[in-house]
Image (cartoon, grey):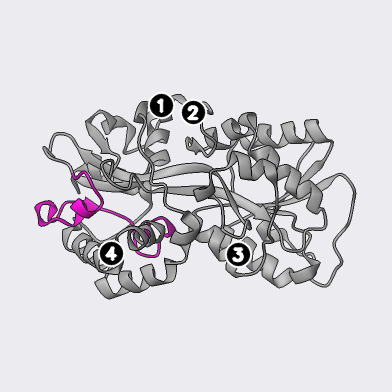
Amino acid sequence: MRFHTVSILALAVAATAAPALAQGELNLYSSRHYDTDERLYSDFEDQTGITINRIEGNADELIARMEAEGANSPADVLLTVDTSRLQRAKDAGVLQAVESDVLEERIPGQYQDTDNQWFGFSLRGRIIFYAKDRVENPPQTYMDLANEAYDDSICIRSSTNTYNQTLLASIIENQGEEAAREWANGIVENMARDPQGGDTDQLRGLVSGECDIAVSNTYYFARALADQVDGVTEGIDNIGWVFPNQDTTGAHVNLSGGGVAAHAPNRDNAVAFLEYLASDSAQQYFAAGNNEYPAVEGVETTEAVDQLGEFKADDVDLSAVAEHLGQAQEIFNEAGWE
């Protein structure tokens, strides 16, 4: 079996060209780029005889491309990360509803779009990390992060970051707009520095001493447990972590997932692929590629993820959370969160 990978910069197929309706093919638009996905795709090809043609690129570029291609799009499946991007694809009209007993049975309802246009296949917690030698009483909830006791202590990404947008949207859904505003304002007051870089950079801030507390997705820390991550691994023994809200809603989780393209020329193959992603073996590959948690319960996780331990995840419907994304950005702007 072989894969056909095309750079987003080399996508010169005219939007007016009719898509090929070849039997036994699947045209996959993916913003995922993990080595273990190769095994994921080859197993599907071996099991089904369907050839996967991949187009890879930035999630926003792929969604924009699908919009531009319209009814002539060759895309069968879109895979991307973060609830906000999945919802963006739905809002852009580039996905379609899927009725599948397999997906309904395997994927928990809170990780599905209410209209069945997208499904989550792996999870990442957005949790609290802290310097053990400098923080005696780490925050135990998301709202605790806004407490004045943590003034000048926090490293966190910008308000334009999709992970932060979805986290704030979940606070709106769970606790209401007033609590969300209080949280955003409190975090701005407690920042140790202006937002900069990615989640790994927030963890580096702990090691360097720029901050005492950081907010990051679990898989960034798990990477540093599994392999060398400059600026993190060498100080990792001094980093502790808290899964927030364990006595209330549970820790916020986000998704890596996908859906069937609105004009999929190989729709049956696309549905079969999503159903395959919900299988135990595919769940293990899908999640392991980025040290995430499988969406399907009972599937084995990586050694690094195991070290993080078990936790109570927020069971809020992420489709409902996605409805607050625009409001979340407005609250960030009003709080002066860069």
The quadrant holding residue 71 is bottom right
- Say which of 29 and 316 sits in front: 316
Counting residues from the N terminus, which is met first, the one under dot 3 or under dot 2? 3
- Residue 31 location (% of width, % of height): 60, 52
Counting residues from the N terminus, which is met first, the one under dot 4 or under dot 1? 4
- Residue 251 location (% of width, % of height): 34, 45
Counting residues from the N terminus, which is met first, the one under dot 3 or under dot 4? 3
Distance in Å between CA atoms under marks 4 and 1 = 31 Å
Mark 1 lies on residue: 306
- Residue 25 location (% of width, % of height): 83, 47
Q: Are marks 2 and 1 in contact (CB under 8 Å)?
A: yes
Mark 2 lies on residue: 301
Mark 3 lies on residue: 90
Three-letter amino acid code of the residue under disc 4:
Ala
Position of residue 146 relative to residue 236, above or below, is below
- Say which of 250 and 142 sits in front: 250
- Residue 278 location (% of width, % of height): 63, 38
Distance in Å between CA atoms under marks 2 and 1 = 6 Å
Three-letter amino acid code of the residue under disc 1:
Asp
Mark 4 lies on residue: 180
Q: Are marks 3 and 4 in contact (CB under 8 Å)?
A: no
Q: In the displayed structure, does residue 20 sit left or right of residue 317?
A: right
Q: Is residue 138 rendered magenta in the image?
A: no
Query: In the rendered image, which quarter contains the C terminus?
Result: bottom left
- Residue at disc 2, secondary structure: loop
